Image (cartoon, helix red, strand yellow):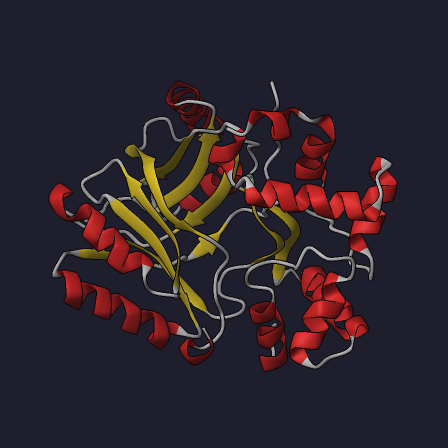
Amino acid sequence: MPGGLLADPINQALLDRYQRDFPMVEHPFAVIGQALGLAEKEVIARFEALKQCGAISRVGAVVAPHRAGWSTLAAIAVPDERLEDVAALVSSFPEVNHNYQREHAFNLWFVVTGEDRRHVARVLDEISEKTGLEMLDLPLEEAFHIDLGFPLRWT
Amino acid sequence: MDMTDQDRMLLAAIDDGLPLVERPFAEIADRLGWEEARVISRLQALIDEGAIKRFGVVVRHRKLGYRANAMVVFDISDEAVSAAGDKLAALPFVTLCYRRPRRPPAWPYNLFCMIHGRDEDEVRTQVDEAAVAAGIVDAPRDILFSRRCFKQRGARYRKEAAA
């Protein structure tokens, strides 16, 4: 973990407070700067540094599932010796946004997002065909959470 | 409410997040050929409607010291699953909670949640707490710890041709 950057209380505040309710105004970073006593340019530089070090993936929208298209959670049981190759194949699809190895017989889990069901089904078919492996297709049926961001603890 | 094609274009324009510049919405507006005010007001409307669940910083838990991340799955009867899901979702360490189909015999679980912790022991403790809180201690369950992250970024909504 890039300790120095994340030990800084102002950076911690940027990560904590702005997971939601980002200011939707012309100069959002100036508004954040006012709240934290920083110049607009410094807020931008700090977000840039946090992005560079990988602490944040982006500042942007988390879209509710199935509002802008279709998506599914899929899993494949991949023999260990093929995991690297199959993972690389899966990640190579622009429709795949998350792709994780997990500890289970179904050891590769990924999310496929597309314009509609047909688009997503086409990607799954292509992955099945190219890998020849059993696949689970587990589309969301009910969402229970309103994502308010994640409360971070620093100690 | 369904999104319009224009809303989809707008979301596609911010797939990778806002540019980190003084007027990020103006830069998005330039890409779309829109006015800055329209970008801001449409995004605000999508937030208000719930189509955007939240707008802000998307953190990478692992880089912030939350090294253990597990997908926790339960098999809950169809009658009880919604109530259990609501209770799990209310816990602070549960970041996502969904009902998904079972695929027997390979996959018997229908309730999924994500739990992030400092280490695997913390996650296991939280899973026990979650099962008690949701009244599902006797339900079959499994904890799938994540090992490697091969890819994590925002979803793409644009057509392949534009990707």
Residue B90, image x, y percentages:
57, 37
**Residue A38, placed above or below residue B44:** above
Residue B20, image x, y percentages:
68, 55
**Residue B26, placed above or below residue A20:** below
**Residue A110, placed above or below residue B161:** above
Is residue A62 shown left or right of residue A107?
right
State the count of labels: 0
Q: Quadrant of residue A88?
A: bottom left
Q: Residue visible at 59% across and 76% down?
A: B9
Q: Residue visible at 39% across and 50% down?
A: B151
Instruction: Give the quarter of the figure containing the C terminus of chain A.
Output: top right
Residue A25, image x, y percentages:
82, 59
Whether residue B103 is visible to the viewer of this picture, yes or no, is no
Residue A48, image x, y percentages:
64, 47
Q: Residue visible at 61% across and 25% down?
A: A4
Q: Quadrant of residue A38?
A: top right
Q: Residue visible at 67% across and 44% down?
A: A47
| Viewer-proximal residue among A4 and B47 | A4
| Viewer-proximal residue among B103 and A17 | A17
**Residue A116, placed above or below residue A78:** below
Is residue B148 shown left or right of residue A125?
right
Q: Quadrant of residue A96?
A: bottom left
Is residue B155 shown left or right of residue A13?
left
| Viewer-proximal residue among A119 and A89 | A89
Whether residue B75 is visible to the viewer of this picture, yes or no, is yes
